[in-house]
Structure formats: C-alpha cells, structure tokens
Image (cartoon, rainbow, N blue to C red):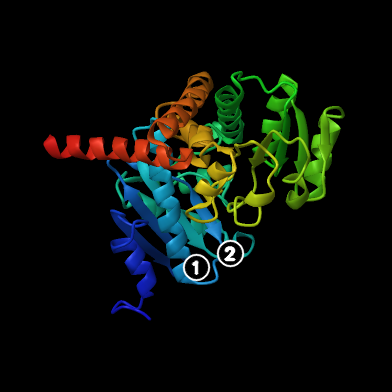
Amino acid sequence: MTDVTGAPADVLHTLFHSDQGGHEQVVLCQDRASGLKAVIALHSTALGPALGGTRFYPYATEAEAVADALNLARGMSYKNAMAGLDHGGGKAVIIGDPERIKTEELLLAYGRFVASLGGRYVTACDVGTYVADMDVVARECRWTTGRSPENGGAGDSSVLTAYGVYQGMRASAQHLWGDPTLRGRKVGVAGVGKVGHHLVDHLRDEGAEVVVTDVREEAVRRILDRHPEGVTAVADTDELIRVEGLDVYAPCALGGALNDDSVPVLTARVVCGAANNQLAHPGVEKDLADRGILYAPDYVVNAGGVIQVADELHGFDFERCKAKAAKIYDTTLAIFARAKEDGIPPAAAADRIAEQRMHDAAVARRAR
C-alpha cells in the first residue's frame, strides 16, 4: 500500500507516528546526470547540527533505503547525546553499489545536496564511503568531516572507535568483577577489520587472552601474524559465542549479533563491541539481563569515531579526542549505575539518559 505521494505507507507511518520516528526532516536527493539517488534524514538538532555518516549501499528498494536512513539517524541522536557532543543525529544513504556507480561526479552532486542544508547536517564516512570520498564531497560542502589529514581532516576514525570500546570493556569489568583490568580475561572478538584489529591490540597489551573470527581469512591471518601468542582463531561466530570460559564477547562486524538464536547459547558474562545495532529486536536486552549477561550499549561504547569527526570541525587534535573518548569509561559506569537504580537493562538506561539530554536541550532552546 502507498500513500498519495507513492511512498510506501509503512515508511511514512514510521516517520510520523511510530516511536522510531519523530524525525525533523527527510530529504530525497536525485541527480540524473550522475545517477545519484540519496536520502538524508535528520532525526534531531536539539543539541546542535545533526552529525552522522554517509552509507553507500545497494538497497533492494528505495523504501528500504529510507527506512535505514530513518533508523540510523535516530541512532546517531542517541550516540551523540551520550558522547556529550553538541550535535544532533542525522544519517545519509546513497542508493546503489559503490563498486559500480561511485564516481567523482556523483559524490560532488551529493556534496551539493548536503551543502543545501546550510549546516543543519554534517556528514562523514560510513559503510561504502571512505576518507578519499569525503575529500571529494568536501569540495562542494564545508560541512564534511572524516577527511584526510592532507585536506585538513583527521583521517581514519577506527583507532579511537576501538579505544572507546576498550574503555567500555574496562568499565564493564569494573562493574561486574570490581576491577577494570582485562588481564587474564578471555575475550572473543567477532570481526577483526578496521576497528577489531585495533581492539585486539589493546587487549593483548593488557594481557587478555583473545579468540577471534572473521569471514575474511586474510583478516584473521593478519591478527595471528601480529600476535603469535595469546590469540587463537575459530571458524565462525557461532563457534565463538560458545567458547568455554569466555568472559567478554565483542561483536565488531555486522548488526543484529544479539538475537533469539545467539543469546541463549552465549557463554560470555559481558557483551561489549563496536558493531552498530547489535540488538536484533526490542526485548533482546531483557533476554540478556535475564541470563545475567551485562550488555554495554553499542552506541555508547563505539562513539570514539564520532567524537573524532566532530572534533575535526574545530581543528583536529588527537590527544584532545583521545581524552574525550577515554570518558566512555565513566559514561558506561554511569549507565550501569542508572540501570541498577531504575531496575532496567543498561540499554534502556542509556536511552533514558540520552532522551533526557535531548529533551532538556529542546526546552532550553524554546525558552530562548
């Protein structure tokens, strides 16, 4: 079923009526000359200009692309709020296979659409887009981050993303075991790509035992070559989550890692990883809590990257960013304390804190 615009009715219902909606603005972008079709979704600007990456992906339908943009933008509002940034949440998706249709002309056209928002949306990298792409977009749009150092940017944000996850993991250990050290703990890392391999470095530096898996054999081989001691590999995630004696599980690949199949067999006492949208559906957070598994909310612990790209707007300073990312430790502990106080799972506690910050900012803006 469609509405009068021809858009699927379920997408418009999400936008205007559901709890997953509430977005301020959604922009549909098309440039026929370059083949660009994009969606820019701004969920909230209560805390400041919306900040979030650009995903370039071959969606099956335009409706799927719109739905993904809405969901991702909403998630960025919560992530930025919990990171203490003066930014709201936004996200953009470009529809198509980047290996086939990504061109300089298309990226420049996309940059012009972002620029047309006059600073309400600040873009960066995401799945399918890279630092070199942001350098091109920035030629048409000053509100672009994630650029190369040669072009005034901070470059790859995976270093601080991994560092933030590591801090969240330390906070989880402190909350559960009374000691933030991971020395001697067994940590399973699913996905050892851009972020995951940096996380393994932190864990081995502290003396943790690490078990890894990745769909790419070369990524696993790189880790094993880099860490010939203290790291072992298993065939896949299904095997990893069942490893005997696992203390921490770190999903660092695709979303939806925590679902009705994985949670019942998970051996770890803590889940803390870099992947976005780890909870496959509402209710999984309660399933984890019922099993006594401590969940560090993904959008809290993986915020190191967005902290980095936000800093780019003020003249990037790595040590300043690292100090901000280190505070993820304190933020994670505060979430666990709030969850215990309110008798709710940590994911719900994080949502409440983020929603309160956005609400307070909106009230203050209306009062001005």
Mark 2 surroundings within 10 Å by alpha-carbon count, few (fewer than 14), some (14 through 19), many (20 or more): few
Please name the residue shown 61% across and 23% down the image. Answer: 177
Sequence order check: which comes first, mark 2 or mark 1? Answer: 1
Whole-percent x, y for residue 191 in the image: 70, 44
Task: Tell me whether circle 2 and circle 1 mark residues in contact (CB < 8 Å).
Answer: yes
Please name the residue shown 65% across and 47% down the image. Answer: 253
Residue at the limit of the structure toward the left, as seen here: 367
| Residue 9 visible somewhere in the drawing | yes
| Residue 153 visible somewhere in the drawing | no
Label 1 SS: loop
Please name the residue shown 52% across and 54% down the image. Answer: 55
Whole-percent x, y for residue 113 in the image: 37, 56
Quick one: quadrant of the N terminus?
bottom left
Q: Quadrant of residue 206?
A: top right
Whole-percent x, y for residue 65 in the image: 47, 64
For residue 58, above or below residue 84: below
Mark 1 surroundings within 10 Å by alpha-carbon count, few (fewer than 14), some (14 through 19), many (20 or more): some
Q: Quadrant of residue 351?
A: top left
- 276 left or right, relative to 79: right
In-front residue for pair 38/153: 38
Q: Amino acid at mark 2?
A: Ile
In-front residue for pair 305/108: 305
- 37 left or right, relative to 113: right
Whole-percent x, y for residue 312 in the image: 45, 31
Q: Which residue in the protein does label 2 denote?
A: 101
Please name the residue shown 55% across and 25% down the image. Answer: 175
Q: Which mark is residue 203?
A: none
Q: Quadrant of residue 45?
A: top left
Q: Which residue in the protein does label 1 denote?
A: 35
For residue 4, above or below residue 281: below
For residue 132, above or below residue 56: above
